[in-house]
Image (cartoon, rainbow, N blue to C red):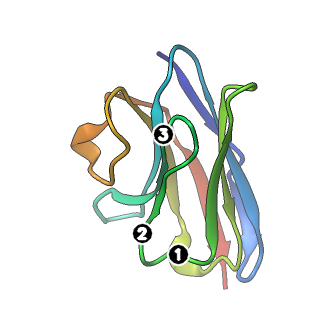
Amino acid sequence: VQLQACGGGLVQAGGSLRLSCAVSGRRYAIGWFRQAPGKEREFVAAISWGGGSTYYANSVKGRFTIFRDNAKNTVYLRMNSLKPEDTAVYYCAASEAVVSERESRYDYWGQGTLVTVSS
C-alpha cells in the first residue's frame, strides 16, 4: 500500500488549503494526523471507506472537512480559517479495520506534507 500526501504550503492566517492523499490498493479507512515541531503527532480527521462516517478533532471541527473520491483513490482534507497553531507536518494513514481516531489502528502511513500558517 502506498499513500502519497500533497498540497501543503505556506498560507496566511485565515486562509485555506486542500491536502490530498492518493491511496493505492484496496478499501481503507483514511485518517489525517499532524505533528507540530516539538509536539507529539495528533489526530486531525478520519473517514470511512464509503465516506459515510467522518470524525474530527475538536480543534479543527467546523474548519476542516475530510472527504474522498474513491473513483480517483484520493482522500482530501479541506482546511479553512487556518490558524498559526495548525502549522505542522500532515500525514495521511490507511486502516484495514474500522475508521478510528487512534494511531495504533492505522497500518500504513504516507510521508507527510508541511503546512505553515503565518500570523
Q: Are marks 1 and 2 in contact (CB under 8 Å)?
A: yes
Q: Quadrant of residue 18?
A: bottom right
Question: Could you tell me how many numbered marks the image carries?
Answer: 3
Comparing 42 with 111, the one in front is: 42
Classify 3 as above or below 115.
Answer: above
**Alpha carbon of mark 1 to alpha carbon of mark 3: how far?**
17 Å
Classify 9 as above or below 38.
Answer: above
Q: Give the crowd class for mark 2: few <14, some 14-19, many >=20 residues within 10 Å.
A: some
Q: Give the crowd class for mark 1: few <14, some 14-19, many >=20 residues within 10 Å.
A: few
Comparing 86 with 32, the one in front is: 32
Q: Quadrant of residue 109?
A: top left
Q: Which residue is mark 2?
A: 57
**Alpha carbon of mark 1 to alpha carbon of mark 2: how far?**
6 Å
Q: Are marks 1 and 3 in contact (CB under 8 Å)?
A: no
Residue 14, image x and y in percent? 74, 82
Callout 2: helix, strand or loop? loop
Q: Which of the marked residues, 2 or 3, is nearer the chain's N terminus?
A: 3
Residue 68, image x and y in percent? 66, 41
Residue drawn at 63 percent across, 75 percent down: 63
Classify 87 as above or below 27.
Answer: below
Q: Which mark is residue 30?
A: 3
Callout 3: helix, strand or loop? strand
Identify the residue at the far left of this view: 104
Left or right for 96, reference 51: left
Q: Give the crowd class for mark 3: few <14, some 14-19, many >=20 residues within 10 Å.
A: many
- Give the residue type at disc 1: Lys
Left or right for 11, reference 113: right
Residue drawn at 28 percent across, 60 percent down: 40
Q: Which residue is mark 1?
A: 61
Left or right for 68, reference 100: right
Comparing 65 with 53, the one in front is: 53
